[in-house]
């Protein structure tokens, strides 16, 4: 527990300057590095050859840069945004198939998912910082994930009785999931009041993205179960790897991207 707390405090201290400099290239560099590590962890999990790991890491570094409107330009960033949606649908489907059926000859699809899912998800963090559809909404990707996770744990310990997904994550409970979602909705209401956005839309986003955060956690855990590993890596002592810490953020970013694209068409 002491190691977990120490790591969390250090990570928070390091995150503050990144937040302050979020509208500069610093954010893109940090997210690109996280993306590269996440891809390396995923490709290591699926036992990819070293050469394919390195190709994946290069893609992991490149996609967040391609998502940065200030660097890549409007056209490339917009292309990235719309390509990320089918990539996310494909990746989620393949990961679920891998967990459910444990196919022995599906390496190429799961490799593509292992590269695109984390790199596109983190790239969307950069994109939505630059493309301010809602002010500072990229920060809500992290806040929603961490608030949901923290309050789900707290609510689960107090009220948890019914298991949410005993085979994938035995400690998670339905009561905890509800508590985490309620907390996320409250966080989004506060966000709506601060940035003067529609409370109704933000309540909907709180519900939607909190569910996405919990599903993202379960999705990453499902892949670990399929390959029988405990943590993706030990980058963060006591917490695991980048994928262990940002698994919720990835699906939150992908789901918000789908919402933003669909909402813009209505």
Image (cartoon, rainbow, N blue to C red):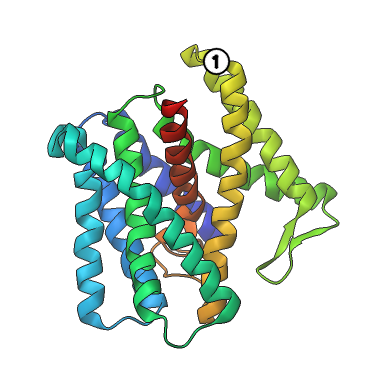
Q: Does residue 244 appear in the picture of this structure?
A: yes
204 above or below 229? above
User: Is disc 1 placed on a helix, strand or loop?
Assistant: loop
Name, please, the residue furthest toward the top. Answer: 196
Q: Give the class, few, some or many, for how many residues have Cα within 10 Å of label 1's Cα (few <14, many ≥20).
A: few
Q: Quadrant of the N terminus?
A: bottom right
Give the residue at x 82% y 48%. 158
Q: Position of residue 176 (x, y in %)?
A: 74, 48
Name, please, the residue furthest toward the bottom. Answer: 104
Give the residue at x 64% y 30%. 185
Q: Does residue 224 appear in the picture of this structure?
A: no
Give the residue at x 44% y 46%. 254
The number of numbered discs placed on residues in the rendered structure image is 1
Q: Position of residue 31 (x, y in %)?
A: 29, 47
Q: Residue 125, located in which quarter of the rendered image?
A: top left
In the image shown, does 12 or 222 lie closer to the viewer?
Answer: 222
Q: Position of residue 130 (x, y in %)?
A: 27, 30
Q: Position of residue 200 (x, y in %)?
A: 62, 19
Query: With 194 as the anchor, is 21 left or right in this view?
Result: left
Residue to which mark 1 is pinned: 198
Query: With 163 as the anchor, is 142 left or right in this view?
Result: left
Query: With 133 as the anchor, is 96 left or right in this view?
Result: right
In the image shown, does 14 or 180 lie closer to the viewer?
Answer: 180
Give the residue at x 24% y 76%. 52
Name, please, the residue furthest toward the front. Answer: 266
């Amino acid at each position: 527990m002491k190691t977990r707390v120490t790591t969390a405090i250090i990570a928070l201290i390091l995150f503050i300057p990144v937040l302050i400099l979020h509208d500069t290239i610093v954010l893109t560099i940090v997210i690109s590095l996280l993306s590269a590590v996440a891809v390396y962890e995923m490709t290591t999990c699926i036992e990819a050859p070293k050469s394919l790991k390195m190709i994946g890491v290069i893609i992991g570094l490149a996609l967040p840069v391609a998502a940065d409107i200030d660097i890549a330009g409007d056209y490339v960033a917009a292309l990235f945004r719309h390509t990320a949606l089918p990539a996310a649908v494909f990746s989620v489907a393949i990961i679920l198939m891998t967990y459910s059926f444990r196919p022995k000859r599906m390496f190429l699809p799961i490799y593509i998912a292992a590269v695109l899912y984390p790199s596109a998800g983190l790239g969307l963090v950069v994109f939505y910082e630059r493309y301010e559809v809602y002010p500072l909404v990229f920060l809500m990707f992290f806040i929603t994930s961490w608030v949901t996770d923290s309050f789900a744990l707290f609510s689960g310990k107090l009220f948890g009785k019914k298991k949410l997904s005993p085979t994938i994550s035995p400690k998670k409970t339905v009561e905890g999931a509800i508590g985490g979602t309620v907390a996320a909705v409250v966080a989004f209401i506060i966000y709506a009041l601060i940035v003067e956005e529609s409370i109704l839309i933000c309540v909907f986003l709180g519900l939607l993205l909190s569910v996405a955060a919990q599903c993202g956690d379960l999705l990453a855990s499902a892949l670990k179960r399929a390959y029988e590993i405990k943590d993706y890596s030990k980058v963060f002592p006591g917490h695991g790897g980048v994928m262990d810490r940002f698994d919720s953020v990835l699906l939150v970013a992908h789901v918000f991207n789908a919402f933003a694209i669909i909402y813009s068409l209505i």
